[in-house]
Amino acid sequence: MGGFRIIWWVVVVIFYLLGVIAALDAIWKGRTSQGSVAWSVALISFPYLAVPLYWIFGDRKFHGYINARRTGDLKINNIAHDLRNKLENNNLISKDEHPDFSVMEALAKMPFTFYNKAELLINGETTFDAIFKGIEKAQDYILVQFYKINDDKLGTKLQTRLIAKAKEGVRIYLLYDDIGCTPLPRSYMEKMRNNEIEVHNFKSRKGWAHRLRLNFRNHRKIVVVDGKIAYVGGLNVSDKYMGINPKYGYWRDTHVKIEGPSVQSVQLPFISDWYWATQEVPELNWEPSYLHEWKNNVLVLPSGPADELETCGIFFVHAINSSKKRLWIISPYFVPDQQVLCALQLAGLRGVDVRVMIPEKSDLFITNLSTLSYLQDITKVGIKVYRYKKGFLHQKTMLIDDERSMIGTANFDNRSIRINFEINILFSSKEFAGKVEEMMIEDFANSFQITEEDYTKKPFWYKLAVKVARLMAPIQ
């Protein structure tokens, strides 16, 4: 018994020491004070549970990616530098002197480009019909990147089409997130590898020191055909995104198809991700095409935990602050940090028509509870909150005033702002904004408005759960 007690006390002391060390690490490296406090309290109070969780979820900076990118930076930076020169020499950089452009371009490290064609792709059938038609037209190469790919009807359709193009001699590079695709059987990817398709996972846990790291996800959804057509948006490869999954039913999502010089900017984050996974940079088409009959100003804004700045969060704050008449936001997960929340409140106080749409039913219970905790904070300044009732809402879109809009992969939550690799496409075009407005008006017609009473009238235990969920928001 005496030996057992000694071992027990040694284990206790070790856990508390690890808890203190991890708490100091959380304070030193934390990107928000709320997150640092939440982790520190948990690590010191409950080290047996919190220390393993911190090892898995506590990282906030993707240092391995940064170091790898620095190694490959010479070639990748040369590509980006040469691309910018080509855009400038061909007069494809937007000459619109909108005051917001300089901030956006500094974040993206690339300019707004002109002469882009943009097409809204609403819901799964329209999106994948367009993607599959694009794949069929490929003559040189296809880039494919998804957070989630399932071995189901839609996954099989994608696999079959890619294999068919590979047999025609088209080069295919497929990158998937190893955490998002955890249920995917190895045989699915092996079949494509056996047919000369280059397939790799993103390897967010690369390196012995990061085997337990589950926090970082590559949430980008990208398809590029021959450097001429790009598809970006909220849809992954799964039958549920087609609205045929009985659990979720109708699935409301949005993608965008773009043609023109902005397509090359979509390739840049792909090759950066590909280099991290493979240490190789594929030979791609970097000659920007342009369509004179189309006048869309487009900026590609990738973001992630390897950025020097919090790109996504700064963009959200700047977009909100720049709104003058209207700010409509649609996101399946709405858990803003303090900076974004203050920007929204200021917009409401300025008299901006701020509307936020979230799903009526959510697939993440704790995130849904966290969202409800913000009702009082935003509705008291005139912000309107809606729940989409027709089905599951998954699109990530934004409409700012009468000419600016966004279609992308980033949600309005801590994970997209600080932890995930994301990509958003920004548009400065009254014509395209009008199409986004029409789409959103129909979505609002399938929604109902909620108020703070939807929270205040709930029973005590429910409100307590909401409060606890909000405390967890910085580390979700």
Image (cartoon, rainbow, N blue to C red):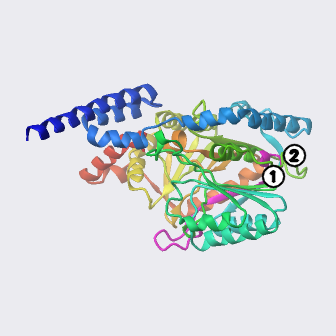
Q: Amino acid at mark 2?
A: Glu
The residue shown at (72%, 68%) is: 163
The image position of residue 69, as x and y in percent, is 65, 36
Q: Please state the extent of the stretch shown in magenta in the rendering.
A: 241-264
The image position of residue 404, as x and y in percent, is 70, 44
- Mark 2–mark 1 Cα distance, whole angstroms, equals 8 Å
Residue 219 visible at all: yes
Q: Residue furthest front?
A: 3
- Are the residues tagged 2 and 1 within 8 Å (C-beta)? yes
Q: Residue furthest left?
A: 1
Residue position marked by numbered label 1 in the rendering: 227
Q: Amino acid at mark 1?
A: Gly
75 horizontally vs 22: left or right: right
Is residue 272 in the magenta section? no
Please tell me which residue lies in front, 21 or 458. 21
The residue shown at (75%, 52%) is: 432
Is residue 242 in the magenta section? yes
SS class of the residue under badge 1? Answer: loop
Residue position marked by numbered label 2 in the rendering: 287
Task: Give the quarter of the image for residue 66.
Answer: top right
The image position of residue 343, as x and y in percent, is 53, 34
Q: Quadrant of the C terminus?
A: top left
> Which callout, 2 or 1, points at the residue further toward the start of the chain?
1
SS class of the residue under badge 2? Answer: loop
Please tell me which residue lies in front, 59 or 229. 59
The mark total stands at 2
Q: Is residue 466 above or below residue 393?
A: above
Q: Is residue 324 above or below residue 117?
A: above
